Structure formats: structure tokens, C-alpha cells
């Protein structure tokens, strides 16, 4: 069946809402959080209505059903990423996933492959979301390791010209985003992963802006760890994924300790269950994990390649439309080559907060500010930008409304 | 248009022609405040003579609401004593928390009543308060030096 965004939008009850005095909602903020199809809302609700019990515990039917639903969701995620089931760990979000791996490395004692010390380095990039920057800043501060980074060019690409000195024999971790949440840039993972593995470093990928929008195969990407959020992928809030290669998860110490992540416990010590349990202490966010499984099934039924193609077509349309407007400056790559559907821009002297407010009065939801990537916006010399981020339910008509809205704002603010 | 409640002419005027937006090198206290959710920044210099505000100067980047608010603040507070300043600041805080139910007392707040509409937009209240918080911080620091 041909891809039909307007038909897909009908699966999302919120997109039927009227806002700001009867305006149709035009939601262009999926990079912050996606809207949810009815099937996901139902899946989460039905878990509570019919199956709610603590997973992996309890000798009763509900506990069995809850466990089946939760583990079923894990299998769905594993298939989606081309991962092994035991490599998929449920967290409460990508921020927790990234903190998990950073804190777990910080827990690694001398002799463990993840142990960090003075002289080692951690490599990030200037385009990281704070969630993939601060955990590494903190890990460096705690261990004495040095934090290094790839710079961003004026075109919004990573400057890899000095890749061999940025990633060197002392590098233990390379943590970067797959697709920038501000620029839309899709980073060249192949060259970076190759260099990282050459020096024995592991690659941690922040896939928050890629997994919901394009086919992602963890084996093909040649990476070691990956994080994404459920709520940006049509799923509920409160659930995220941390994926790691099984041999690495075996060596990685736990981050949170407590119930259900153990093999044996005495008054003075404990041993750990194998992954994924080792990294899932406590009763997990079960209904949310089940909801995420349903979201991924929904995405798969439409097809990730079809979703990607749709978003690229929209991105091309919007970039073209923006290029025709006077005083509009796109912050990030100007073509769809290696870029996705997060499009940031500035409009003359109109502050993004004012532009966002004006667009909101027309029913258009965009994000404004530094997008939790303050070092990046500083580097690019813009205090803030306005960002439209696209998804499967957006249409060209949404983008026409945005382009008209920008022209209206220029008139309103006298720019 | 409902938006006009927010963007009153007075606000856009102050935004386009901000008052006292040039840092005076002579000051008793200098503060730098940021709004971490949107990246707006302000540097504010304050001079006090006893309990009287003799000069406020500032520089910064931000949206029309934050810039207009601090511009209005400088017009309002320069020349006032600290008792009047407290009265005006309290009235402004009260207005910002009014959720659109109050218009503000023009006798006390003058141009600042134009910001009344901001109180209907929860995400923008902190924009309007950026300069006022900076001023409060600066006055505390300047007083501590006396």
C-alpha cells in the first residue's frame, strides 16, 4: 500500500484536536516527543486493565501474562534492531540508558576492560545533546580521563580531518549521536567506528533521532552500545532502550543494583544475573515497555524505509520552501544528503521564542531554544533556533502552513 | 487576535528601542543571569546611592518579552528608593502570577502593565522575570557592600 501520511494521522487521536481557538493542530515537534497512535494508548491501558502484575515474580496467572507481555516487547525491540534478545535492556529513557553505560564504566575496577584512569580519553562531538555530553563530562571528572571532541563545521557536519589524533591509542570510549537533534545531520559512523575499533575503543551511539525515523541495524552499524527513547518512537514516556553487544554486557558492571538483577545474595556480597537482568534492577516500567513493543510493531507494519523516504521527501520540500523565504537561515545541512527531518532555522532578528509563540497562535507546534545542545548553538553563533521536526504523520500541507506562518510572523514583528 | 494580548505595542516598542541597553562601566554590582530553558542571557549593572537606585544598565540577548521587560524595568526603577522599588517589584511579581485575571495598577507599574498578558502564557513568565530577577540579585549584592 502506498504511504499515506494523512491516513496515518487518523491513527493518532491527538492530531484531531483543535487548539488555540479552533485551529487544527500542526505538530512539528516530534523530535522532542512523538504523538501516540491509538493502538499504543490501548496497549498501555490494557496492560493495566487486564494483565498488571510484577514481572519475573509471583506464581500466579497475572504474573505470567505480564512477564510474557514484557518479554514479548523485548523480542519485538530485538528484531527491530537486528539484535539478540538478551542484548536489549529496558530503561526509563535514553537519558538513563546513556547514564547507565557511563556510570557502569565508572564502576569498573582496574583489570576490567571498561576501567578508566588518568591518561585515557573519552571522545564526544560538539553536536551532542546534553544527555550524551554530561554523563561523559562527569565520568571524565570522576576517573581522571580526558574529554575530547570532534568539532562541527559551519555546514553542520563533523570535522573528521583530525580523526586519528582525536581518537588515539588512549581513547576508550567514543560517544556520539547518530542524527543531530538540532542540525538533522546524520553522522558518518563507518569511519568513526572503524577508527575507534582500531584503537580498542567502544562506540556508544545516541540513536534517539535515528531509530524512530529510519531502518537501524545494530550489527550493520558496527557499533557497541546504543540508546533510544520510547516516547520519540510513538511509544509511551518512561521507557527507553539500552542495547549492547552481549560480550561487552558480560564485562560491564551494573549501574543500579537491587531486586531481580542478582544471581545470589549474602549479607555481605552479591553476584549478578546475566544481561539483560543485570541492568534491570527493580520492578520495571512494564506497561510502558509493552506500549513500546506495540509502537514498534506499528512502525514495522508501515515500514521504516517508507517512513524514512517520506521524511526525506518532506525535508527536501521544507528546505526548498525555506530557501525561498527572505531572511530565513537554515542551521544545518542545506540538502537531504546524510540528513534527517530535524530542521532548525532563524528568521531575521525575530527571536525564536517569539516566532514559536506566533506559530502557536496558528496551531503550529515547533520547538525553540538551544534544544539541549547549548555548546552547539554557541559554536554556531546563534543563541537559539526554531526547529521543525517531522514524522510519519506530517504532510506537505503542514509545511505549507509553517512557511505561511513564518511570513506572517515577519509581518507581525515588523522584521 | 489573542496574541495581541501578549505582544502589546508598548512591548514591541521597548523591544525595538530598548532603554539603557549599554553597560555603564561604573557600578556597585554586576550580575549575569541566564534562562537555561531557552538560552536568554542578561548582564545587569546597578548603582545605588544609599537607598536610591541611581543607575541601571544592561546588555543581553533574548526574546521580545525578556528584552522589553528589562527595558521597562530600567525606566521604572531608576531614581526610586528601595522602598518604592520593593513595592513596584512586588506588584510586578503579583501581576505575573495572576494567570490573566489582573490588569495591573498603572499608577505603580506604568508601562509594565503591558506585560499583564504574559501571565496567561506560563512558559513566558520566566522570560518577563529574567531582568527582574537579575535586578533583585544585583540590589542584594550592592546592599551587602554598603
Image (cartoon, coloured by chain):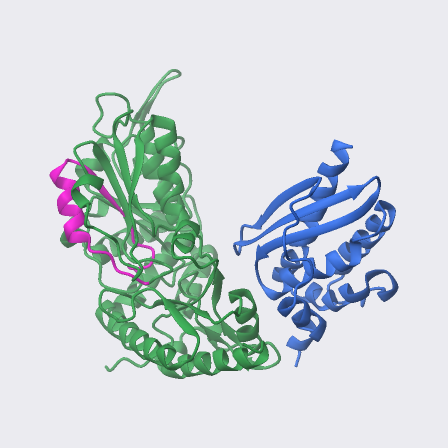
Which quadrant of the view contains residue B106?
bottom right
Number of numbered discs present? 0
Residue A84 x %, y %? 19, 48
Q: Out of A247 and B14, give the one closest to the viewer.
A: B14
Classify B113 as above or below A364: above
In the picture, measured across the screen, residue A96 lies left or right of residue A190, that is right
Residue A377 x %, y %? 42, 55
Classify B5 as above or below A63: below
Residue A263 x %, y %? 29, 28
Q: Is residue A254 visible?
A: no
Q: Give the residues in magenta.
A: A184-211
Residue at the extreme front:
B25
Q: Is residue A94 visible?
A: yes
User: Which residue does the image show at 41% across and 37% down from the upper left?
Assistant: A282
For the C terminus of chain A, give its image quadrant.
bottom right
In the picture, measured across the screen, residue A258 lies left or right of residue A168, that is right
Query: Is A204 one of the magenta-colored residues?
Result: yes
Q: Out of B96 and A126, give the one closest to the viewer.
A: A126
Chain coloured green here: A
Residue A256 x %, y %? 39, 33
Chain B rendering hue: blue
Classify A77 as above or below A30: above
User: Which residue does the image show at 16% across and 33% down from the upper left?
Assistant: A169
User: Which residue does the image show at 78% across and 43% down from the upper left?
Assistant: B48
For the N terminus of chain A, give its image quadrant.
bottom left
User: Which residue does the image show at 63% across and 61% down from the upper left?
Assistant: B67
Q: Out of A174 and A48, give the one closest to the viewer.
A: A174
Query: Is A376 one of the magenta-colored residues?
Result: no
Amino acid at each position: 500500500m502506498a504511504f499515506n501520511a494523512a491516513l496515518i494521522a487518523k491513527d493518532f487521536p491527538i492530531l484531531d484536536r483543535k487548539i488555540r481557538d479552533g485551529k487544527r493542530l500542526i505538530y512539528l515537534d516530534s523530535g522532542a516527543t512523538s504523538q501516540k497512535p491509538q493502538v499504543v494508548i490501548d496497549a498501555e491501558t490494557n496492560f493495566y486493565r487486564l494483565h498488571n502484575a510484577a514481572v519475573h515474580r509471583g506464581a500466579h496467572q497475572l504474573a505470567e501474562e505480564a512477564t510474557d507481555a514484557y518479554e514479548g516487547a523485548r523480542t519485538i525491540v530485538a528484531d527491530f534492531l537486528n539484535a539478540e534478545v538478551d542484548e536489549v535492556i529496558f530503561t526509563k529513557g535514553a537519558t538513563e540508558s546513556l547514564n547507565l553505560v557511563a556510570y557502569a564504566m565508572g564502576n569498573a575496577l582496574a583489570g576490567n576492560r571498561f576501567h578508566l584512569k588518568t591518561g585515557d580519553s573519552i571522545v564526544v562531538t560538539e553536536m551532542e545533546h546534553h544527555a550524551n555530553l554530561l554523563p561523559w563530562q562527569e565520568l571524565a571528572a570522576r576517573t581522571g580521563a580526558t574529554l575530547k571532541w570532534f568539532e562541527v563545521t559551519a555546514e553542520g557536519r563533523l570535522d573528521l580531518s583530525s580523526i586519528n589524533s582525536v581518537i588515539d591509542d588512549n581513547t576508550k570510549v567514543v560517544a556520539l549521536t547518530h542524527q543531530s537533534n538540532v542540525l538533522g545531520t546524520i553522522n558518518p559512523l563507518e569511519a568513526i567506528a572503524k577508527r575507534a575499533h582500531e584503537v580498542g575503543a567502544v562506540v556508544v551511539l545516541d540513536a534517539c533521532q535515528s531509530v524512530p525515523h529510519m531502518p537501524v541495524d545494530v550489527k550493520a552499524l558496527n557499533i557497541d552500545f546504543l540508546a533510544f527513547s520510547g516516547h520519540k518512537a510513538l511509544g509511551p514516556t518512561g521507557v527507553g532502550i539500552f542495547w549492547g553487544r552481549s560480550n561487552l554486557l558480560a564485562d560491564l558492571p551494573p549501574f543500579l543494583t537491587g531486586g531481580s538483577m542478582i544471581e545470589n545474595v549474602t549479607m555481605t556480597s552479591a553476584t549478578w544475573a546475566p544481561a539483560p537482568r543485570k541492568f534491570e534492577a527493580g520492578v520495571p516500567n512494564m506497561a510502558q515497555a509493552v506500549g513500546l513493543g506495540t509502537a514498534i510493531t506499528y512502525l514495522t507494519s508501515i515500514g521504516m524505509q517508507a517512513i524514512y523516504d517520506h521524511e526525506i521527501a518532506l525535508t527536501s520540500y521544507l528546505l526548498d520552501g525555506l530557501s525561498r523565504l527572505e531572511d530565513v537561515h537554515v542551521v544545518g545541512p542545506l540538502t537531504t544528503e546524510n540528513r534527517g527531518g530535524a530542521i532548525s532555522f532563524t528568521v531575521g532578528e525575530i527571536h525564536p521564542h517569539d516566532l514559536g509563540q506566533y506559530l502557536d497562535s496558528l496551531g503550529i507546534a515547533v520547538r525553540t531554544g538551544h534544544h539541549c545542545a547549548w555548546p552547539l548553538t554557541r559554536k554556531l553563533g546563534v543563541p537559539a533556533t526554531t526547529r521543525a521536526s517531522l514524522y510519519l504523520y506530517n504532510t506537505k500541507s503542514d509545511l505549507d502552513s509553517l512557511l505561511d506562518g513564518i511570513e506572517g510572523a515577519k509581518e507581525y514583528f515588523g522584521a | 487576535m489573542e496574541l495581541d494580548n501578549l505582544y502589546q505595542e508598548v512591548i514591541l516598542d521597548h523591544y525595538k528601542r530598548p532603554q539603557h541597553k549599554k553597560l555603564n562601566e561604573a557600578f556597585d554590582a554586576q550580575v549575569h543571569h541566564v534562562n537555561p530553558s531557552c538560552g536568554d542571557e542578561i548582564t545587569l549593572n546597578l548603582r545605588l546611592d544609599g537607598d536610591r537606585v541611581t543607575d541601571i544598565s544592561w546588555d543581553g540577548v533574548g526574546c521580545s518579552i525578556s528584552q522589553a521587560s528589562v527595558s521597562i524595568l530600567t525606566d521604572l526603577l531608576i531614581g526610586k528608593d528601595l522602598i518604592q522599588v520593593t513595592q513596584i517589584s512586588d506588584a510586578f511579581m503579583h501581576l505575573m502570577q495572576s494567570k490573566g485575571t489582573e490588569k495591573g495598577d498603572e499608577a505603580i507599574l506604568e508601562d509594565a502593565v503591558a506585560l499583564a498578558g504574559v501571565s496567561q502564557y506560563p512558559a513566558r513568565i520566566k522570560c518577563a522575570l529574567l531582568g527582574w530577577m537579575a535586578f533583585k540579585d544585583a540590589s542584594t549584592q550592592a546592599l551587602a557592600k554598603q
